[in-house]
Image: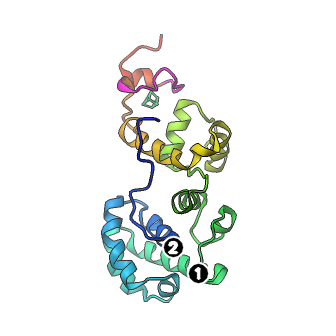
Amino acid sequence: MKRYQISHTALDYQDAFQLLVVTVLSAQTTDESVNKVAPILFAKYQTSTDLAEANPEDVEKIVYSTGFYRQKTRSIIKLAQGLEDLYDGEVPPDLDLLVKLPGVGRKTASVVLAEAWNIPAIAVDTHVRRVTGRLGLTSESDPAKIEQDLKALYPKSAWSGLSMRYIQFGRDTCEAKRPRCGECEMFGLCEWPDRFAFAGQSSK
Ligand code: SF4
């Protein structure tokens, strides 16, 4: 994992509130596409109070290009309302409190903790789950259990950058359908039986 020096999200944000919102918007789309709409969104809705009171049709027009715009509009307005109701508009730097917000799971909460406050946290997304499973670092499929396995394996100081590194590795080498096992420097450590087939080698 030394290959990946840059271990931060490519999403643009100014504070924890904005990071929460852009993380929700980034589902099923690219970070670049979210970065295009985020400045327009946050110029109009500068605080969670503004967004909590937003007219959904206005928000839909802004986030349209990120896809699933109706659902995402509902989610970010609900999120802003939850922030207002539960925490007076302040994003709490605490995983157990963050996951109480509407639509915020452990993955999003961990991203926010690690990125916004540099608090040790491991976000388990589809790439992290696939790559760590293939490598044999976990035999679990539940993200919360994978998170615990990884936390037991790595020192706390490594947690925050870990997810982004695995995500990058999962995108450029250990891809879901066509992993590049033949050129993978982790081949000797990997426990995935199919790696031989993808490397064009016999396992016998
Ligand atoms: S050998 Fe293949 S399956 Fe294993 S980590 Fe590398 S790319 Fe992924």
Examine the residues drawn in magenta and state their main secondary structure. Answer: loop
Q: In this view of the protein, which residue sits in the foreground, 172 or 94?
A: 94
> Spatial distance from mark 2 to mark 1, Cα to Cα?
8 Å
Residue ID for mark 1: 89
Residue 176 seen in this snapshot = no
Amino acid type for the residue under numbered disc 2 = Phe
**Picture coordinates of residue 101, whole percent (x, y):** 62, 72
Instruction: Name the N-terminal-most of marks 2 and 1.
Output: 2
Residue 3, given in percent of the width and then of the height, sits at 41, 35
- Disc marking residue 17: 2
Query: Residue at 41% across / 47% down in the picture?
Result: 6
Where's residue 161, x and y in %? 51, 47
Side of 45 relative to 117 (left or right): left
Label 2 with label 1: CB-CB less than 8 Å: yes
Give SS at disc 1: loop
In percent of the image, x 45 and y 73: which residue is there? 71
Left or right of residue 142, residue 174 in this image: left
Indicate the amino acid at tag 1. Answer: Gly
x 32%, y 80%: residue: 61
Report the span colored magenta.
183-193
Specify the quadrant of the image occupied by residue 117: bottom right
Tell whether position 112 is magenta.
no
Q: Position of residue 66 (x, y in %)?
A: 34, 67
